[in-house]
Image (cartoon, rainbow, N blue to C red):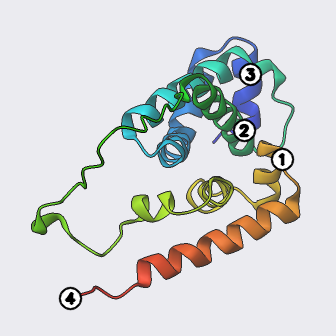
Amino acid sequence: MRTDPDLAAEAARGSEAAFAELVRRHQGRVRGMARRLTGSASAGDDIAQMTFLTAWQKIGTYAGGTFSAWICAICWREFLQVRRRTRPEIEFDETAEIIPFERPSDQQDDRMDLSRALETLSEAQRVCVVMCVAAGLSHREAAEAIGWPLGTVKSHVLRGVEALRKHLAKPKVA
């Protein structure tokens, strides 16, 4: 079985088959990471596709280390680009009437699923938890991928995981 660095070297020499194997190996991790960062399957899939397109274009820049950390770093940068482009301008209408949204009683489930629990975290905690827990990167790999200090990543993961445990362990209110 060929290693990721071997496949990357072949892909850098133009082998589409080698790159396709890298995509097969890492698409689940990248799609999962992108979906969790965006909170949307379709937006996450779009970012994953952009990630692999960028990776193909820049495969010659892969300089060793774990390929999963390299590809997750690209995914992180693609996510940031999309977020910068799509951040809406918020305008407040002081005269607008606020109408509370009422959910039908059958949708009031106090148990939070993981996606909703992730949304309760700060963005920094969510990014670190997604990269280290969901994508399976080490703290060091995540720190290198997003350009943050190792201690910062470790503390965000620790606090984020603890917050998720608290949210997911809340007893159902009757």
For discs 3 and 4, the disc positioned in front in the rendered view: 4
Residue receiving disc 2 = 73
Count of numbered circles in the view: 4
Residue at point 65% right, 26% down? 81
| Label 1: how many Cα within 10 Å (few below 14, some 14–19, many 20+) | some
Q: Amino acid at mark 4?
A: Ala
Say which residue label 3 marks. Answer: 59
Q: Is residue 162 above or below residue 38?
A: below
Q: Which residue is mark 4?
A: 174
The residue at 57%/62% (across/down) is: 121
Amino acid type at image mark 1: Glu
Q: Secondary structure beneath disc 4?
A: loop
Residue carrying label 1: 144
- Give the spatial CA distance, label 4 vs label 2: 44 Å
Sooner in the amino-acid sequence: mark 4 or mark 1: 1
**Residue 92 x %, y %:** 47, 36
Query: Quadrant of residue 105 in the image?
Result: bottom left
Asked whether, in this view, residue 7 is left or right of residue 154, the answer is left
